[in-house]
Image: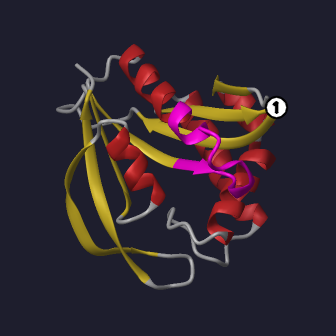
Amino acid sequence: MKVIEIRRLSAAEGRQYVAALAGVLLDCVAGGASVSFMASLSKAEAESFFEKVAEGVEWGERILLAAFLDSELLGTVQIITATPPNQPHRADVAKLLVHRSARGQGLARRLMEQAEGASRAAGKTLLVLDTVTGGDAERLYMRLGWTKAGIIPNYALFPDGRFCDTTVFWKDLA
């Protein structure tokens, strides 16, 4: 049986795992995931993105979680805790990514459960996120009890340049 471990990474650990995190992002983009990046994403750009994420962790603006399957980092999710002064109770969930080779084994579900727990521990009572309409992640969020707020047509692009609709979700943690 494969061992799944979800860990909250410090800024130093985030930097240590930049290459592995970038590898997961590159795989997701290569697989067509609309996660803010286009098909032209380079390894250097993906690594730079996660270097900035580690900075955000260091500054207390983000929580970075990583999923390890048999000790290999194959998934990640972030909680963006830096919010405007009138929204101290809220956080954004961003970049739920699971390498295609590890999908279907519960990593995304476990990452989201840990994201909710880490958000509660950080004093957050409301989470929001957005995802591609009709995708696997949308079905996951529904199974995990998230509430669909609505759909925004043509909100983003898939890596190949096609438009995609985006569904916005929220979850009350109180």
Q: Quarter holding the C terminus? A: top left
User: For numbered disc 1, what is the local secondary structure?
Assistant: loop
Percent of width and height locating residue 170: 25, 41
Give the residue pinned by disc 1.
70
Asked if residue 76 is positioned above or below residue 61 in the image, the reply reads below
Asked whether residue 129 is in view, the answer is yes
Percent of width and height locating residue 42: 74, 69
Query: Does the magenta run of residues contain 97?
Result: yes
For image coordinates 46% across by 85% down, the residue present is: 162
Number of numbered callouts drawn: 1
Percent of width and height locating residue 154: 31, 78
Q: Is residue 100 left or right of residue 37?
A: right
For image coordinates 65% across by 48% down, the residue present is: 50
Query: Does the magenta run of residues contain 98?
Result: yes
Question: Closer to the camera, 166 or 124?
Answer: 166
Percent of width and height locating residue 96: 52, 47
Asked if residue 173 is positioned above or below residue 152 in the image, the reply reads above
What is the three-letter code of the residue carrying label 1?
Asp
Q: Is residue 68 left or right of residue 29?
A: right
For image coordinates 51% across by 62% down, the residue present is: 35
Q: In which quarter of the image is residue 101?
A: bottom right
Q: Quadrant of residue 157?
A: bottom left
For image coordinates 64% across by 26% down, the residue present is: 6
Q: Quarter holding the N terminus? A: top right
Range of magenta residues: 96-110
Question: Closer to the camera, 114 or 135?
Answer: 135
Q: How crowded is mark 1: few (under 14 residues within 10 Å), some or many (20 or more)?
A: few
Q: Is residue 90 left or right of residue 101?
A: left
